Amino acid sequence: MENILVVENLKKYFPIKGGGAVKAVDGVSFSIRRGTAMGLVGESGCGKTTTGRMILRLSGEKTGGNVVFNGREIYSLSKSQLRHLRPKMQIIYQDPFSSLSPRMPVGEIITEAVREHKLVEKRALDGYIDTIMERCGLQPFHKNRYPHEFSGGQRQRICIARALALKPEFIVCDEPVSALDVSVQAQIINLLKELQRQENLTYLFISHDLSVVEHITDTVGVMYLGSLVEYAPTQKLFAKPLHPYTKALFSAIPIPDPAHKMQRVVLQGSLPSPADPPSGCKFHTRCPHAMDVCTQNHPAWLEVEPGHFCACHLYCK
Amino acid sequence: MTRKEQMLLEKRRLAKKVPQSQYLTQMRDSRNALEIEELRTCFFTDAGVVQASDGVSFDVPMGKTVAVVGESGCGKSAMGLSVMQLLQRPQGQVVGGAIRLNLGDCAYDIAKTPENVMEKLRGKAVSMIFQEPMTALNPVMTIGKQLQEVLELHEKKRATKRHAIKLLDMVGIANGKGVYEMYPHNLSGGMRQRVMIAMALSCNPKLVIADEPTTALDVTVQAQILELLKSLKDKLGSAVLLITHDLGVVAEMADFVVVMYAGRVVEQGTVEEIFYQAAHPYTIGLMKSKPVVGRPVESLYTIGGKVPNPINMPDYCYFRDRCDTKTEDCDGQYPAQIQLSDTHIVSCYRAFPREDADGKHSGS
């Protein structure tokens, strides 16, 4: 399987009035193989959403690095070239309440982009939209309704249908189930998994819910303050997290089992400001294992075990 | 029920001179901090009357944590707001039942307490931690002032700055002096929730209602806040009514669990009973549909269908149309509550003793 997406040392700084910059994404590198799902986890403000948007070139120009999608650097494409590429890479947003136009009927929401990109012949368009809606668990008679008439789960199905209608190869799912109830969450997760199998889709799955990430992804990257601190196949990462931040993150998840009383590493304090990140290892201010070297040197990105990458001085030899 | 009734209820609530005998009552069990009995909360809307709580009964023992779980729209928040008498008025009204709050030397029936008396209880005997720390704090008032306001209303004429800073210390805010002068927008979500907790606990209430206290927070911050709530609860001896949809949080915090569905309690019991011997198909479905770290499954269980329309509730079991295990009995009227043990109560025809003697279904 070839890599559908390669991200190399991607950087995005947002300038602050009066000097300085928020380093939202600060040197992130990873690659995703076709037909797999990669998870991106971390606390809010760690830059995972910005990374997702940067990959789709939705967040203005990059500050540095490369995003290579299907062998082409997307930041070097002209406007019209990018437009041709757009249907291939789609995004599903977190909040299905604000990501659908309240004044457009659902059928139009799903059809609009398909028509614009001329993906389907005019005559076949209606039938095509019907099949897409059906596959996402919507009824064709929903077409003339407006988003406000739907529940949160149904709206998320509309968002998925809208993305799927463009026959994408790659979808960024930015917290697609965070706003939904548990039972609806399960339906949407199952739908996303099923569609992936049928269409050989590739997902970048951004979430802070680790149990959902474990369920749906093949590989996971853990982000902290704009950088990846650990990257590994999902099973490996959940079986044996290496980075102290990953460990703390995992131990913070409440397990739905009353016999499982917490032996947790409670992180002190909160995320430092990304405008002025700590020197050396960015995590050293909250790390239970912080050493002298951590405050001075940035830890190298090492392959500690085959396929398991980690940036921590504990594993530097 | 009509608009006329709504106006009547509203009038009674705003009445000025109500004799104490109207709202003072006796606890059924003096070890309970709160007893809710057959609570009925209605919203009178243009489209019809919505029964947000439809005969909800359960107890909150002193010093214990009772978790109320259910999906959005099941009436768990409306139930919490009923206890605080903070329902959106005049549409939202408690129309029946009793909410008995134990103050040690006396007990109030909140369902009958008029507004001017409620003002003295709210924040002192019973207080609430809201879900959104972003919107629950006043954006144009310093943290210190907001904290002192509660104290001035309930405790002394002039609350001192020292007292407010002590409260901030108590909830683990290291820089209490600095935070005292700050505005809510200067603080992170976790810090704001700590301030909310400090405000809620400032008068040592008998009961704290925490409505989704960690839903808006990151997991690492959630862990901090849960630890804080646990330690403070033990220190102050308050009972906690925890409203949440996160089963992980329930397993960690709660002593007792109440499962609500469409305005009714479908199952209640100790946390072990609910997690290991769940009897109601809704509870079982809820547990199965949540992915658990370290327990991979190919595809998640889903509860089919959707919640019935709250304006025209069916007269049979509300869960029947979504239930995998329904029997012919389920066509009958809404199932009565069955006592499976001293603490474990379920409303389901499958749990009726004549069907299967042990009344157990596999939980996972």
Image (cartoon, coloured by chain):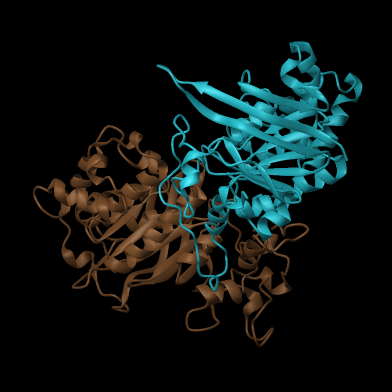
Chain colours: A cyan, B brown
The residue closer to the viewer here, B19 or A89, is A89
Residue B28 % position (x, y): 32, 78
The residue closer to the viewer here, B344 or B65, is B65
Label tally: 0
* B220 displayed left or right of B124: right
The residue closer to the viewer here, B229 or B341, is B229
Residue A302 % position (x, y): 67, 44
Residue B137 % position (x, y): 32, 41
* B356 displayed left or right of A169: left
Q: Residue at x 81, y 18 (%)?
A: A84
Q: Residue at x 37, y 60 (%)?
A: B229
Q: Residue at x 61, y 27 (%)?
A: A11
Q: Residue furthest front?
A: A317
Vertical position of residue B227 compared to residue B164: above or below:
below
Vertical position of residue A120 compared to residue B303: above or below:
above
Instruction: Report if residue A52 is visible in the image.
Output: yes
Q: Quadrant of residue B200?
A: bottom left
* B218 displayed left or right of B62: right
Q: Quadrant of the C terminus of chain B?
A: bottom right
Vertical position of residue A212 compared to residue A165: above or below:
below
